[in-house]
């Protein structure tokens, strides 16, 4: 898995480590069944991991190993990494300063 995820590996590992524990108790929009929107949004992560882990495990026991056999799990791994990256970026956004207007940059086209 590290070979196919490459630079996204830390975010994939974060996704595996968090599982469904990344809940916000303030968002409790239960529809009567006891589940909230966060549970519904996070269940897709477990579904992807239930696909990725058995696939990688079964292929690790194969006598004939080739890199291309692991490529079908790359899209789900990128989805997981992208979700974790979006959380990471959203957490790091600085609050805008009151009354501060950044200078506008103008593009000069030379041709």
Image: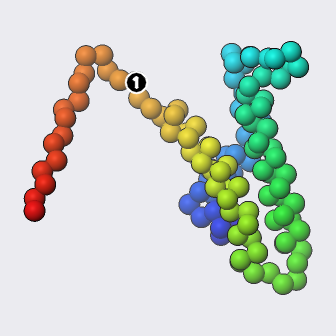
Q: Is residue 103 left or right of residue 77?
A: left
Pick the front one: 78 or 32: 32
Asked if residue 21 shows in the view, the reply is no
Of 55 and 111, nearer the camera is: 111
Looking at the image, residue 34 sits to the left or right of residue 98; the answer is right
User: Which image quadrant is residue 40 in?
Assistant: top right
Q: Residue at x 40, y 24 (%)?
A: 95
Is residue 92 rendered to the left or right of residue 29?
left
Residue at point 83% right, 56% down?
51
Mark 1 falls on what kind of element? Answer: loop
Q: Residues within 10 Å of mark 1 (few under 14, many from 20)?
A: few
Quadrant housing residue 87 = top right
- Quadrant of the frame with the N terminus: bottom right
Where residue 54 appears, as percent x and y from the top left, is 87, 60
In front of the other: 7 or 83: 83
Numbered disc total = 1
Q: Residue at x 59, y 64 (%)?
A: 6
- Residue lying at 75% horizontally and 44% vertically, measured from the top left: 45
Q: x and y percent of residue 74 in the render?
A: 68, 62
Q: Position of residue 11 (x, y in %)?
A: 62, 50
Colouring of the image: rainbow
Image coordinates of residue 61 in percent, x first then y, are 89, 74
Q: Residue furthest bottom?
A: 64
Q: Which residue is mark 1?
A: 95
């Amino acid at each position: 898995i590290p070979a196919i995820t490459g630079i996204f590996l830390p975010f994939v590992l974060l996704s595996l480590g968090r599982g469904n524990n990344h809940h916000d108790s303030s968002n409790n929009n239960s529809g009567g069944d006891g589940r909230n929107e966060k549970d519904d949004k996070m269940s897709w992560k477990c579904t992807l991991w239930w696909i990725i882990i058995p696939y990688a495990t079964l292929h690790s026991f194969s006598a004939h190993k080739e890199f291309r056999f692991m490529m079908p799990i790359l899209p789900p791994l990128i989805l997981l990494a992208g979700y974790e990256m979006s959380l990471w970026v959203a957490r790091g956004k600085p609050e805008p300063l009151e009354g501060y207007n950044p200078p506008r940059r103008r593009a000069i086209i030379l041709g």
